[in-house]
């Protein structure tokens, strides 16, 4: 049977008036008024209103019934400007019910008070809500643009394995037991990092891929166990060229999806400037509340907590002195503690004077100097702290900055802030363990040429060719130039404290390839989910994935993960019987 369909519902306009149409879709809303029945008919493109002048002539229609409708397009007497099809109605001549529907667990409408877990349990119904479907469409458009843009730039799409050798890149891996080799495991990729570098050694020169990645980390509003990267790698380009290439792609998706002309070239903020100014390596610069260095002003204050601390910094919150109660301050303190920042202090301006428990430590001159150099005004609140770790004090105050921006509604909806954070440190010193380092990005990141001599003397000061794209305070992507000579790569592993045997065991298969002519190369990966979030205006990553996991990393729809049978375990060598 061929289903006759002349149009998609969302496309009908006043120019179609007078046409006979055949439509398909779901009854989104059914209501009777003065002997006439009105049905909103929904399909993947939108909604059009059906008007049934003789309700007795059609079968019983209820919400979410699947219908086949024939009729004639007419002009509405009172158009509905909130609907693209709002100027027309379809005067129904016949309706066939393809399928009935039970009463749905929640109403299929953009505004819903259904719990998210209920929506995820019935995700197929949730996807009928234009709110979700439109986000999936936007996501698909980004992918289409990715293909178009990089295809045109001569990139080759290559897909890389999902079953990999375990290679700790930072996050925890998902492991897959081998049926053929009991006791051995594959790991799902955290990213195609090593493969794409090998493709460069393989002479591919320009690679791209829409890549599924898996990281077994605790979930947050912007993190899922599996996510999708728009992944790339190129040979023989320097950092500026790679950034410019990718700015073109960003400009394209912003134009296509939200009609925004991204001002190019994008601003580049060095990592430490971002950290020291905004308390974040992914700053949202749409508002101020910048971090202030108070070391000079407060270093002589006889306050025990400052003794031996290298950094004293603060943040001024305008007009929040009275508003911020003792209890609120305690809560802010707890927030700062999450970022290792102990002992948040505060001062406020009351009748032109600095007040608060810390005021007793200050001389009148120091008070004056603070007010003058920070430009404090009546009722301003100054929050500050000390630490011997630069990252701790920056991140701690940065968290408060974000918190107040939300509380004070400082971010204008529908505005965009795109920038690169560059010059990341190569290593992150392990707190309390002098001489120990972890890689800030990954160990294949290339140190800046001018910093190479520091590798032997002050590794913590070595900066790398590493760049993150930050959009509205989200890290929407990141990449690096890679080391392409064997000796530097070994040196980095040594600084990271790996023995020759460990390196050989973990990465030998990979770095061996560098002995056979590796080109200078580098790349980047965008988080597709995060791009889709920013471009569709949601803070919830689950809104932009068709079938996401909930915050407990389970799927309320299919109930994954589940225990498996003993037979299944035995087959992969994991049952008691295999012991
Ligand atoms: N593989 C890196 C990541 O997942 C991105 C890159 O360096 O290209 O963050």
Image (cartoon, rainbow, N blue to C red):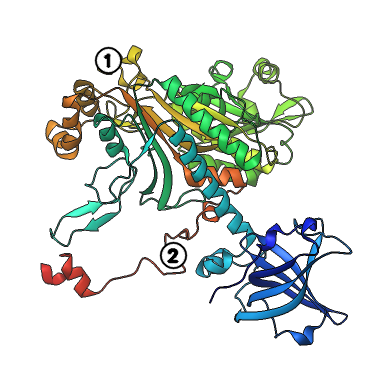
Residue 381, image quadrant:
top right
Front-most of 284 and 521?
Answer: 521
Residue 555: mark in rendering: 2
The disc label shown at residue 396, or none: none
| Residue plotted at (45% across, 60% down) | 549
Q: Can residue 207 be seen in the rendering of this structure?
A: yes
- Seen in the image, is 147 located left or right of residue 90? left
Query: Which image quarter: residue 412?
Result: top right
Q: Position of residue 462 (x, y in %)?
A: 35, 19
Quadrant of the rendered image containing residue 237: top left
Instruction: Report, in whole angstroms, how far the alpha carbon at label 2 lies from the one at label 1.
Output: 50 Å
- Residue picked out by circle 1: 457
Mark 2, secondary structure of its residue: loop
Q: Which residue: 25% across, 57% down?
A: 176
Ligand 1 occupies quarter: top left
- Categorize mark 1 by other alpha carbons within 10 Å: few (<14), some (14-19), many (20+): few
Q: Disc 2 vs disc 1: which is toward the camera?
A: 2
């Amino acid at each position: 049977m061929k289903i006759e369909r002349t149009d998609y519902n969302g496309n009908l306009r006043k120019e179609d008036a007078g046409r006979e149409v055949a439509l398909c879709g779901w009854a989104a809303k059914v209501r009777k008024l003065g002997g006439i029945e009105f049905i909103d008919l929904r399909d993947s493109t939108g909604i059009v209103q059906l008007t049934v002048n003789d309700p007795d002539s059609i079968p019983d229609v209820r919400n979410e019934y699947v219908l086949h409708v024939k009729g004639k397009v007419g002009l509405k007497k009172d158009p509905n400007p909130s609907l693209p099809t709002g100027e027309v109605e379809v005067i129904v001549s016949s309706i066939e019910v393809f399928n009935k529907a039970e009463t749905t667990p929640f109403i299929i409408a953009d505004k819903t008070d259904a719990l998210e877990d209920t929506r995820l349990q019935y995700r197929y119904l949730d996807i009928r809500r234009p709110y979700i479907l439109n986000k999936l469409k936007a996501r698909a458009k980004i992918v289409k643009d990715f293909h178009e843009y990089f295809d045109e730039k001569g990139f080759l799409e290559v897909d890389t394995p999902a079953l990999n050798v375990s290679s700790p890149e930072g996050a925890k891996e998902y492991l897959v037991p081998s049926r053929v080799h009991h006791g051995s495991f594959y790991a799902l990729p955290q990213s195609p990092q090593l493969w794409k570098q090998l493709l460069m050694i393989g002479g591919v020169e320009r690679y791209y891929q829409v890549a599924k990645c898996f990281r077994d980390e605790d979930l947050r509003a912007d993190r899922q166990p599996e996510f999708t990267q728009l992944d790339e790698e190129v040979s023989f380009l320097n950092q500026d060229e790679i950034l410019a290439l990718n700015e073109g792609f960003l400009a394209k998706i912003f134009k296509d999806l939200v009609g925004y002309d991204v001002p190019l070239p994008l601003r580049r903020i060095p990592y430490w400037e971002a950290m020291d100014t905004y308390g974040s390596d992914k700053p949202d610069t749409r508002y101020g509340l910048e971090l202030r260095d108070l070391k000079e002003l407060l270093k002589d204050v006889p306050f025990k907590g400052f003794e031996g601390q290298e950094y004293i910094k603060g943040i001024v919150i305008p007009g929040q002195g009275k508003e911020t109660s003792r209890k609120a301050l305690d809560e802010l303190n707890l927030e700062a503690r999450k970022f290792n920042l102990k002992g948040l202090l505060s001062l406020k301006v009351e009748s032109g004077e600095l007040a608060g428990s810390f005021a007793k430590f200050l001389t009148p001159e120091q008070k004056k100097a603070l007010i003058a150099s920070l430009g404090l005004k009546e009722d301003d609140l100054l929050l500050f702290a000390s630490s011997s770790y630069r990252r701790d004090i920056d991140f701690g105050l940065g968290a408060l900055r974000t918190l107040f921006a939300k509380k004070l509604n400082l971010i204008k909806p529908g505005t965009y802030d795109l920038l690169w954070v560059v010059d990341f440190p190569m290593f992150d010193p392990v707190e309390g363990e002098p001489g120990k380092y972890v890689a800030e990005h990954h160990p294949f990141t290339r140190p800046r040429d001018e910093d190479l001599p520091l590798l032997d003397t002050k590794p913590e000061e070595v900066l790398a060719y590493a760049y993150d794209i930050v959009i509205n305070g989200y890290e929407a992507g990141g990449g690096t130039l890679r080391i392409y000579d064997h000796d530097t790569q070994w040196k980095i592993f040594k600084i990271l404290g790996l023995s020759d045997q460990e390196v050989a065991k973990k990465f030998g298969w990979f770095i061996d390839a560098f002995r056979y002519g590796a080109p200078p190369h580098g790349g980047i990966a965008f988080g597709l989910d995060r791009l889709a979030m920013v471009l569709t205006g949601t803070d919830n990553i689950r809104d932009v994935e068709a079938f996401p996991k909930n915050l407990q990393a389970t799927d309320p729809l299919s109930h994954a993960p589940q225990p498996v049978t003993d037979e299944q375990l035995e087959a992969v060598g994991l049952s008691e019987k295999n012991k």
